[in-house]
Amino acid sequence: MRKIIVLIVSLCHILSASGYALAKNAMADSITDILSECRMDFNGDGIPDEVAILETPGNKYLMVALSANEKSKKPASSRFIERNVSNRTLKCHEGKTVKVAAAVGKAGVVNISGAYLELSSPDGVKTVYYWNGAGFDKALVAD
């Protein structure tokens, strides 16, 4: 529950920074649903993190809450991954080799050693998001 609150607060900051005229309290009230969520260690620090698709009246957002790590003194944080994720299905997977159509500007194979996210759309398009050591990279999955 604490991580979901972190996601909501982060979404408030993102919307405010993006020029949306929503107060933080009003934004917290306007989260209408948590559509999908899963827990895995996305950043490779050995502590499970949480990802969720949060729905507001006007949009759906993919957000990740990274857990605090007491050993390395890293505080909990959250990351906005993508907006407009309507009609997409979220799945979390453990690392493997993924054949991609486009990743960081080129097609090929991406070796993902840890957990990664997959968003699938009804038309069959799949996008993966994986940790690169500092943030998340995005790649379109090839057939």
Image: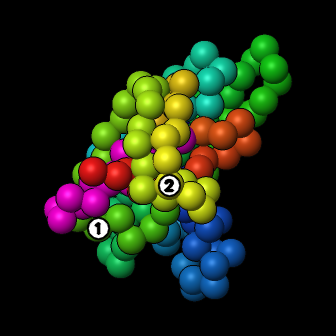
Kindly identify the residue that appears in the image at 60 percent across and 16 percent down: 46
Q: In this view of the protein, can residue 22 be seen by the observer? A: yes
Dot 1 and dot 2 residues touching (CB under 8 Å): no
Crowding around mark 1 (Cα neighbors within 10 Å: few <14, some 14 to 19, many 20+) is few
Element at label 1: loop
Residue 122 lies in magenta, yes or no? Answer: yes
57 vs 109, nearest the viewer = 109
- Amino acid type of disc 2? Ala
The residue drawn where x is 46% and y is 26% is 95
Q: Nearer the viewer, mark 1 or mark 2?
A: 2
140 sits left or right of 90 in the view: right
Q: Distance between the residues labelled 1 and 2?
A: 26 Å
- Coordinates of residue 132 in the picture (x, y in percent): 66, 40
Q: Is residue 26 left or right of residue 79?
A: left
Instruction: Characterize the magenta stretch by its predominant secondary structure.
Output: strand
Q: How many labels does the image show?
A: 2
Residue indicated by mark 1: 86
- Quarter holding the N terminus? top left
Quick one: label 2, few (<14), some, or many (20+) residues within 10 Å? some
Asked if the magenta segment contains residue 124, the reply would be: yes
The answer to whether residue 9 is above or below residue 98 is: below
**Residue tagged by mark 2?**
107
Residue 2 x/y as whole percent: 52, 36
Q: Where is residue 100 in the image (x, y as percent from the top left)?
A: 43, 49
Highlighted range, magenta: 118-130
In this view, the residue in front, 89 or 101, is 101
- Badge 1 or badge 2: first in the primary sequence: 1
Question: What's the amino acid at mark 1?
Answer: Ser
Q: Is disc 2 placed on a helix, strand or loop?
A: strand
Query: Between 109 and 34, which is closer to the camera in this rendering?
Result: 109
Q: What is the x, y in percent for residue 8? A: 51, 55
Residue placed at 50% from the left, 55% from the top? 107
